[in-house]
Image (cartoon, helix red, strand yellow):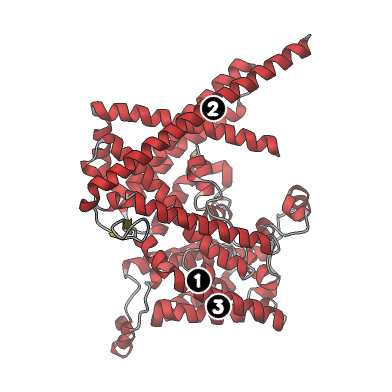
């Protein structure tokens, strides 16, 4: 009798979930139809007031393309030459590896030589600054790696140069005297101190990995292999490549320099640890088969087509860079803000995956950035784990755990996000973004710790708990959108203006619509998560 009653309850719940899922999908379809229609009208009515639009190639010659984002415009313009250069580099690397059976030492020399050609074009004579700082860091690591105060020295050295590089705009050769002044005429095509941010992360990674190589490893390889489905199949996942100490013979100056300036990942990443890089120089990655790498490349091409379609139809970023959002209604501000965040996600998705694809062809696997779509993240923690995922792995390994990990989580996030902001650039709006994010992070962490201790005793408790989680996700997405708009679009000075717009009569209605939309989106994410769990 009880079993029959339980079965009927289960069927009723499944039917209820299906009805809820159908309603959520219908709402989302309606929302995107509305957004697309309104976005097309906005782009058509305001294009003459926007900066950064150029003649496009889709639909008709008169159709303009949004090229207002400097990063995307430079990448898109240089995509053919980048594809050719990395195609030649990876072809040469693979031929030499097989022809001469090169291992770690030989491959480090080869990639250093190829990367040197690449850097000479990018930075010209400024590569002298890069190798001078890198060599100093190498000596510091080798001399003080076993000292108790080593990590303090490592951070002070690298943070010092991170700040100085930005403050002095990459320095000038003239400061060394008139004899060196002529080298300022050969500074290359790309500012070296911008790329050096990633080099700093690699120098810290090398320092820590060499420091930990002298200590007993806490990584339980056998336990990891038992739990990891990739390692069980005889392949090596990224985690085992990172956590397993490299051989002492791999911590050479050539391998170190090769790691710092490895061409496919030099400009934008993804970020890879020294241990992982050195081990894959010796034995190429076996996680991805040739078929999977080809499929990965085809998916990237599809993403590029989607971006071209988006920038030809919707001028979201042009609205942001032209400050034209100030003359829009609250509803249009919401749509443009939502569009800007999706544009940013797709832009970084394409840039990071292009360079990662080039690295995979060369036999070096780097962590995947943006493994989840931005529209499938309902809490800050999962958002940051999936946005710049390789940077997140770097932060966890070299900052979060050394700072005390989860035991000091509420304090650690302020240190970490402040570092992330100044690492990107020395700007107040980035610090505002970092501190706003931390401010929104604190209540989420407190709520998560409380919900982890909560156990639903019945169907009603389970329903209430799920609804509270959905409400929490709604607030989190709203806060995340505000923090990113302040950090990357309107700046701190525009924050009070934004609040005043949404506190108006029309703005309050739009704010209610926005909360409802994010609530529906969060509930839909729950269904996606449930479906994934049932498939495992």
In the displayed structure, 497 sits above or below 155; it is above
Q: Which residue is mark 1?
A: 83
Total marks placed? 3
- Gap in angstroms between the C-alphas marked 3 and 2: 50 Å
Q: Earlier in the sequence, mark 2 or mark 1?
A: 2
Q: Which residue is mark 2?
A: 22
Viewer-proximal residue, 479 or 145?
Answer: 479
Residue 97, image x, y percentages: 68, 79
Q: Earlier in the sequence, mark 3 or mark 2?
A: 2
| Image-based side of 405 in relation to 219, left or right | left
In this rendering, which labeled residue sits more in front, label 3 or label 2? Answer: 2
Q: Quadrant of residue 231?
A: bottom right
Viewer-proximal residue, 58 or 457?
Answer: 58
In the displayed structure, 83 sits above or below 384; it is below
Residue 96, image x, y percentages: 66, 81
In the displayed structure, 21 sits above or below 40; it is above
Element assignment for label 1 = helix
In this rendering, which labeled residue sits more in front, label 2 or label 1? Answer: 2
Viewer-proximal residue, 61 or 466?
Answer: 61
Element assignment for label 2 = helix
Q: Which residue is mark 3?
A: 88
Q: Residue at x 53, y 66 (%)?
A: 202
Q: Residues within 10 Å of mark 2 (few under 14, many from 20)?
A: few
Which of the labelled discs sits on residue 475, or is there none? none
| Image-based side of 205 in relation to 60, left or right | right
| Residue 482 visible in the picture | no
């Amino acid at each position: 009798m009880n079993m029959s009653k339980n079965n009927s309850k289960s069927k009723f719940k499944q039917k209820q979930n299906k009805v809820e899922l159908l309603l959520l999908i219908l709402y989302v379809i309606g929302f995107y139809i509305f957004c697309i229609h309104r976005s097309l009208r906005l782009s058509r009515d305001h294009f003459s007031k926007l900066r950064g639009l150029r003649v496009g190639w889709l639909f008709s010659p008169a159709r303009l393309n949004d090229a207002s984002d400097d990063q995307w415009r430079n990448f898109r313009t240089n995509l053919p030459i980048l594809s050719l250069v990395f195609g030649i580099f990876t072809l040469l690397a693979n031929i030499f590896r097989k022809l001469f059976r090169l291992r770690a030492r030989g491959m480090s020399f080869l990639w250093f030589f190829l990367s040197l050609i690449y850097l000479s074009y990018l930075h010209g004579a400024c590569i002298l600054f890069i190798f001078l700082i890198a060599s100093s860091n190498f000596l510091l690591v080798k001399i003080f790696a076993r000292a108790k105060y080593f990590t303090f020295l490592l951070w002070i050295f690298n943070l010092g140069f991170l700040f100085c590089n930005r403050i002095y705009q990459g320095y000038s050769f003239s400061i060394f005297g008139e004899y060196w002044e002529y080298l300022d005429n050969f500074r290359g095509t790309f500012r070296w101190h911008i790329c050096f941010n990633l080099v700093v992360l690699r120098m810290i990674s090398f320092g820590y990995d060499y420091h930990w190589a002298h200590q007993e490893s806490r990584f339980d390889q056998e336990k990891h292999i038992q739990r990891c489905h990739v390692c069980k199949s005889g392949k090596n996942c990224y985690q085992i490549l990172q956590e397993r100490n490299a051989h002492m013979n791999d911590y050479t100056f050539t391998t170190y320099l090769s790691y710092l300036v490895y061409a496919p990942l030099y400009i934008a990443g993804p970020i890879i640890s020294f241990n992982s890089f050195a081990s894959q120089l010796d034995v190429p990655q076996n996680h991805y088969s040739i078929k999977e790498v080809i499929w990965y490349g085809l998916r990237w091409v599809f993403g590029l087509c989607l971006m071209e379609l988006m920038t030809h139809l919707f001028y979201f970023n042009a609205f942001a860079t032209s400050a034209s959002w100030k003359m829009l209604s609250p509803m249009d501000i919401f749509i443009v803000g939502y569009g800007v965040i999706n544009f940013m996600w797709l832009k970084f998705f394409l840039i990071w995956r292009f360079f990662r694809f080039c690295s995979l062809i060369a036999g070096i696997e780097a962590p995947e950035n943006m493994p989840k779509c931005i529209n499938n993240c309902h809490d800050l923690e999962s958002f940051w784990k999936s946005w710049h995922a390789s940077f997140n792995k770097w932060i966890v390994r070299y900052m979060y755990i050394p700072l005390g990990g989860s035991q000091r989580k509420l304090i650690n996030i302020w240190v970490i996000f402040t570092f992330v902001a100044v690492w990107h650039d020395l700007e107040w709006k980035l610090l505002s973004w970092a501190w706003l994010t931390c401010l929104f992070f604190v209540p989420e962490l407190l709520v998560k710790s409380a919900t982890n201790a909560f156990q639903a005793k019945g169907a009603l408790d389970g329903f209430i708990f799920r609804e509270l989680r959905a409400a929490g996700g709604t607030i989190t997405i709203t806060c995340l959108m505000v923090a990113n708009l302040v950090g990357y679009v309107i700046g701190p000075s525009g924050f009070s203006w934004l609040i005043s717009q949404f506190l108006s009569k029309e703005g309050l209605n739009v704010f209610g619509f926005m909360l409802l939309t994010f609530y529906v989106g969060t509930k839909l994410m729950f269904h996606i998560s449930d479906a994934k769990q049932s498939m495992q």
